Amino acid sequence: MATLVTQPTGYSPNPSEEEPLNYLNVTHGWKSWLLTVDHKRIALLYLFSITAMFFMGGTFAILVRLHLTSPNGLFAPETYNRLFSMHGIVMVFFFLVPSIPATLGNFLLPIMIGAKDLAFPRINLLSWYIYVLGAAFAIYAVARGGVDTGWTFYTPYSTTYSNSYVLAAAFGVFVAGFSSILTGLNFIVTVHKMRAPGMSWGRLPLFVWAHYATGLIQILGTPVVAIALVLVGMERVMHVGIFDPRVGGDPILFQHIFWFYSHPAVYIMILPGMGIISEVISCFSRKRVFGYDFIAASSMGIAVLGFLVWGHHMFITGESMYTGVVFSFLSFFVAVPSAVKVFNWMATMYKGSVTFDSPMLYAFAFIGLFTIGGLTGLYLSTLATNVTLHGTYFVVAHFHFVMVGGMVVAFMAGLHFWWPKMTGRMYNEPWAKFAALLVFLGFNLTFLPQFVLGYLGMPRRYSAYPPEFQTLNVLSSAGATVLGVAFIIPMIYLTYAWFFGPKVGRNPWEARGLEWQIQSPPITLNFEKTPVVTQEAYDYGEPEVLEVG
Amino acid sequence: MSANFADFFLASEIASKQGSAIDALWWFETAVTVIMTVLIFAGIAFFAYKFRKRPGVHATQIEGSTFLEVGWSVFPFLVMLVMFWWGADLFYAAQTPPKDAMEVFVAGKQWMWKVQYPNGYREIDALHVPVGQPVKLTMASEDVIHSFSIPAFRVRHDVVPGTYDTLWFTPSKPGTYHIFCTEYCGNQHAHMIGYVTVMERADWEKWSGGGGAGGSLTEQGQQLFTQNGCSTCHLLDQQGRCPILRNLYNKPVQLADGRTVMADDAYLRESILMPNAKIVAGFEPNIMPNFQGQLSEEQVIQLIAYIKSLSPATPASQQGNQQPPIVIAPKAKAAPVVKTIAAMQ
C-alpha cells in the first residue's frame, strides 16, 4: 500500500546534485532520438515539428493581417489567397490536429494510466515519420508557390480551376492523416489494454478520457477526409468527373465528405484541450474535479454527436430546407455537453483553494474564450442567422475563438503545467504570467473586431474590402501583432528553462495524478515497478500518498 | 456609406423586409451571448477571488451534483430550442418566395455577376429593384461555386454550378447597397462585387422601360430555339422525334426508367445541357446532342423562358413574351406591368 511522501516535492534544494538517469540523458546522439520508441522522446520530436509548423502558419497569419491593414491590400490578390490558404492548411492539419494528442497526450497518457509506454511504440514512431513526410509535401507546396484553394479544398475550384500546387498540399494532408489515425489507434488500444492494476475506467484522469474520445474521432473520421482528398486528386489528374457538374458530377458531394471529417475534426482539436483544463482547474483549486462522471461522459457525447452535425456547413449550399432543419437541431444538441464542461469547471473552483500560477491563468482564459466561441456557434447553428453570417468574418472570429482561444490556450496551459515534468526544470513564472495576460489581450483585440466585421457583412477570404471596414481591420491587425509577440515570449523562456531553469522535484504543483509520483524528468520506462492504483487522480482531500518509489 | 463610428456598433443598415426580422433574432442571440459571457467571466473572477488560497483554509471536497448537472444541461437547451425554432421559422420564410415575386436571373462567372431581366435588359455587377416589390433571383454559375449576398437585405445563397439556386427579398428602403460574392472563387474573388440599387417604383419603371436590345428573354429564347435546330425535332403541336414542349413546364414527366420528375427549371436546364441524363418514356436516348459547353447559362435561361411561355397555364413564375419589362402577370398575355402592380396594391 501507500506510504507518505518522503522525497522533496517542490524546487530542488540542491540543484548541483548529479542528475539521476532519465529519458533525456539515458542515451545520446541523433540516432537515439530518430530511432527511439520511447513515447516521451517521440512526444518531444512531435513538439519540435508542430512548433515549427505553428510558427510557419503564424507567419502566414501575420502576413495576412498585414495585408488587410489597407482596403486594397499590400500584396497581389494571388499572393494573399495563397497566404490565407497556407495559413489554414498548416495550422489545421499540421498544428491543431496533432498538437495536444501527439505531444502532451503522447507523453502523458501512458504515465497517467500507469503504463510503461503506448501499446505500439514502433507505430508511434512511424506516426511521427508519416507526419514529417506529410509536412514535407506541404512545405514543398509552399516552396513551389503555395496553394490557393483555402484549407477546405472546395470543388470544382480545387479540381478544375486552381492554378496552384493543390496536389502536393492535398497529398501532404492525406499523408498526415495516417499519422493522426495511428496516434488515435494507439491511444485507444493503450487505454483498453495497458491500465495499471486498480486503474478502473472510473478512475481514468479526464485528460485520458478526452484523448480516448479524440482517438475514436481520429479513427472514424480521418479515413473519410482521406477519401475526399484522393477524389480531388483523381479528379484533378484524371478528370474522373465525380465533382464536375459538366459531366454529371456533384460539387456539393465533396463538401459532404469533407465536413463529415472536418466538423468532427474540430472536436479532435478541442477535446484534448478540455482534458487539460479539467486537470489544471482541479490542481490549482486543490479540489477534486466537480462532476467527474459528467465531464467524462460529455467528452464521449461530443465525440458521437460531433459526427451528426456536418450539414450545418451547407445550410445555404442547396441542401434541402428540411435537411437544414435537422442539422440545425442536432447542432444545438452538441452545444450541451460543451456547456456542461464549462459549468463543471466553474463549480470545481467553488469552495476550493485557488492559486494563480500560469497554467491556471491560461485555464481561466480558456474558459472565457471558449465560452464566447461556443456561444457564437449558436448563431451559426440557427438557420436564419447562419444565412446572414455564413462566409463572413463572424465565422472566422467564431472558429478562432474555439481553435486559438480554446485549443491553443489550453495547449499553453498544458505546456506550462507539465513542462517541469517533461524537462525537470521550472520556467520563469513572472514572464509566464505576463505572456498569459498578453495572449488574452492580444487575442481579444484580434478577434472581437472580426465579429463586428462579420455582422456588418465583410466576407472572409477577401484580398480587398470596402474602405468602411478599415478601422476594424486595423484594430484586428494590431491585435495580431500583440498575439504574435505573446507566442514568441513563451518560446524563449520555455527553451531557456529547459537548459538553465532551476531544477524541480517530482511534484512542484503538489498535484495528485500518477505522473506526479514519478521522477522529473521520468525514467525511460516511467515507473520503477508497475504502480497499483488505489485512488482517483483528484484526491486533494487527503495528504499526498505515493504508490511508487 | 460613411465610415461613421456609430454605424459599426449600433446596427448595420437594414434595407429589406426580412432584414429586421432576422436582426431581431440576431439581437436575441447577442443578448444571450453577452449575458452568459458576463456571468461566466464574473463567476470565474468571483470564485477565484472568494476561494483564493488563504492560510489555514482547506478546499472542501465536493463530489458533484446530479441536480445541478441536469439543470445546467436542460436550461441552456431550452434557450437553444427557442433559437432553433425562431431561426427555422424565419428560414422557412426565406426559402419560400411569394407567388407574385418579380423574377430576375443572375449568372455568376469568375469574376462577375451577370444580371438579366425578363424584358431582356442586362447589366453586370448591378441590380436595380423597386422598393416594396418582392424579387426572386434565379441563379446559375458558369464555373465554380459562388455565393450571392446582399448584407443589407440579410440574404445570401450559394450559386452552385450544375443547378439553379434561388433567393428572394423585398427591398424596403431606397438606396445603394453592396453585393458580395461570399464563397471563395479564385484570384479576383474580392472583386466579384457590385451594387444593388433600390429605387422608388416610378423611377424604377422609368429605368426599366427600355428593355433589352435583343428583345425579351422569351423572344431571345425563341431565336435560340430556332438557331440551334431545336425546332426541327421538338415540334410544337405534333409528335416529332423529341417530346412536345407545349404545356410541359411544371408538369410531371414520366421517365423511361419509371421515375416521375417535375419539369421545373433545373430539369429543363439539365435536359438541354445533358439530354441523356433523364430520358422521357417512349423516346430514344442519344438523339439530342449535348449542349454542355455550347450554350452559356444566360442562353439556357432564355431557352427556359421560351419553354415556360409555351405553358400559359403556369401562373406566377412564368415569363411573358410581351414587350414591357417584368413579369408579375398571371398569364402570358397579361396586362403591362404597371397595371399589374397597381392591381396588387
Image (cartoon, grey):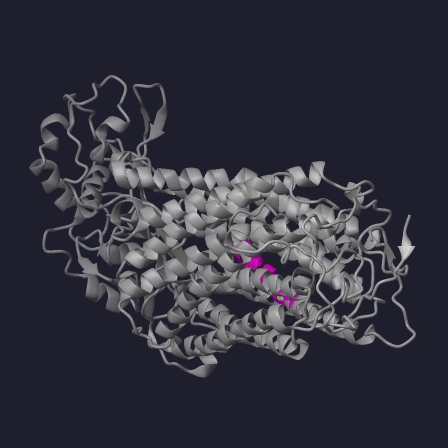
Residue A364 appears left or right of A285? left
Q: Main secondary structure of the magenta part?
A: helix
Residue at point 89%, 64% (across, down)? B60
Q: Position of residue B65 (x, y in %)?
A: 84, 54
Q: Nearer the viewer, residue B4 or A155?
A: A155
Give the tally of numbered discs: 0
Q: Nearer the viewer, residue A28 or A491?
A: A28
Q: Nearer the viewer, residue B177 or B93?
A: B177
Residue A236 falls in image quadrant = top left
Residue B272 appears left or right of A177? left
Q: Position of residue A534 (x, y in %)?
A: 87, 47
- Span highlighted in magenta in the image: A366-381
Q: Vertical placement of A433 versus A207: above or below? A: below
Q: Position of residue A81 (x, y in %)?
A: 32, 61
Residue B310 falls in image quadrant = top left
Residue A156 visible in image: yes
Q: Nearer the viewer, residue B222 or A340?
A: A340
Asked if residue A375 is among those painted magenta in the image, a careful observer would answer yes
Q: Vertical placement of A363 versus B310: above or below? A: below
Q: Position of residue A475 (x, y in %)?
A: 46, 78
> Dividing the image into 4 quarters, which one contains the C terminus of chain B?
bottom left
